Image (cartoon, coloured by chain):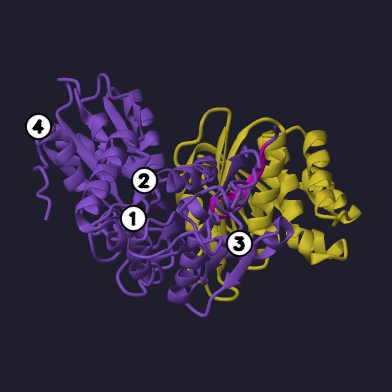
Amino acid sequence: MDYVLMKGNEAIAEAALRAGCRFYAGYPITPQSEILEYMADHMEERGGIFIQGENEIASMSMLYGAAACGARCMSSSSGPGFDLKQEEISYLSAAGLPAVIVNAMRYGLGDGEITAGQDSYWVSTRGGGHGDKRLLVLAPASVQECADLTYLAFDLAEKYRNVVEILSDGAICQMIEKVYLPEAKEHDINKFDWTLSGKPRDQKKNKAYNLSYYMGYEAYNKMMREKIETMFNEEQRWESFMVEDAELVLVAYGISSRVCRTAVRQARKDGIKLGLIRPITVWPYPRKAFENLPECVKGCVGVEMSLTSQMGEDILLATRHTRPLYGYLTGKDLPTAEGIIAYCEEILSGNIRPMEVL
Amino acid sequence: MADIIMAGFGGQGVLTAGKILIDVAAREGMNVSWTSSYGAEMRGGTASCSVVISDEEIGSPYPTRLDVLLAMNEPSYDKFIGQMRDGGVVIVNQSLMSQRRYPDNVDVYLIPATDQANALGDGRVANIVMLGAMIKATGLIGREAFAQGLEHYFGKKGRSNPKNLEAYRIGFEEAGKL
């Protein structure tokens, strides 16, 4: 198997096609438009359907139809476009329909910027519209992971009949790296017994709407609670890097985690013992990674491209408040290794107070 | 192993120069990353890409300290020269630079890339003239290996053009260390 050089966006789209995704509907918005463009270019040759909907909401409704028929389906957006998908994520969740949605984060409120950001963490990990449900949220930190996690996302979506989100950012999506693409496979649209398909007259037809309506709330609640608990226990993914002897543990995902890795290596050359915990799933948050943190760890430092810490409360929950939390928050600017190291030196010198999560 | 920024006016082909460089370096077995600046840029404004080439796993794809700067115009030079590491290599498009003093802590290579490309009858290959100068100045990739990689890059796009190799040769041979 040989590598190809691709942007993160392209790797997501190609991996989706290789996972058997044969339906894509979406609406362009920077910095994820290459996903849509790639699908426009290549979906037809794989025998699938690409639709640029009239807007995000319509695209998501189309996705609902495709998912209800058992197709592997995907949509993608960013910033305000992703907001528009929330309602339908709730509907997909209500009906237990598997779908993969990409959110390539851009920075800021409103239109904000078209460049990278990480301030859509909450809308991704706590969002998904109204009602009680969880999205599985996977956060790639390389072009390779863009491919691998998208490929995985379709399996997870079907395993749990749940919406899976790929939470990327403008930096990871736009960068080019080597990627080894997964093997192409075909998905059998008729493999599930719950999908909408033709049935003989005397058999009950499947329906694709709120599961609680025909399961009854008692059974539905039990099913949902068990599903959320199982996903939480089974699907935590993370990478720990030099945590064993660290004085401070950086906690970062996506593009920030890349800079943190450089910072850890660079700091250790100067005798400053930093480590890194990189969540790969941000829901479920990898709390297991924080169990049994070594005694030498004096604190955790969340590194995020956000105005306030959005991941901070997850870190505090994961450490069960056993360590002080600091925040290196760079807003619309990419963090730098030098900046992270200088900040950590200040923490170790006692010049920076722990952060309150607001 | 190098942290590189390639910068110039929009339209000078700096993003493509970066893509060519990572394509060849990847074929030589190195790890590579490429990121471009994007955002609300004006037509005729600056464009740049960051390239990291390494034998090791690449951390940040946005280097803040540079080993190599390829500056296709003066504003780009001014913008990034302050980020150079001591002993770094700067390749300057002399055609679009005023007479000036260069810092002592870096090796500066001058090449009138725009003029050379125009003399070749195709102003678009100025970026490849610059790449030729860069390969000579840095030795990141062997002269012949890069030439083959260049052919491969354009060949797979169905856009082979003998002027590319000629531009590369001129850049390599005519670049002069200050």
Image mark 3: chain: B
Say which amino acid is labelled 1: Gln
* Percent of width and height locating residue A171: 46, 53
Q: Does any portion of residue B64 appear in the rendered image?
A: no
**Closer to the eye: label 2 or 3:** 2
The residue at the point 29 percent across, 38 percent down is A230
Residue A5 forms part of the magenta stretch: yes
Per the model, the C-alpha gap separating discs 3 and 4 is: 50 Å
Residue B126 forms part of the magenta stretch: no
How many numbered discs, if any? 4
Give the drawing colour for chain A.
purple
**Closer to the eye: label 3 or 1:** 1
Where A271 sits versus A213, above or below? Answer: above
List the residue tagged with mark 3: B8
Query: Quick check: do tags 4 and 1 share a chain?
Result: yes
Closest to the observer: B154 or B3? B154
Q: Earlier in the sequence, mark 1 or mark 2?
A: 1
Q: Does any portion of residue B29 appear in the rendered image?
A: yes
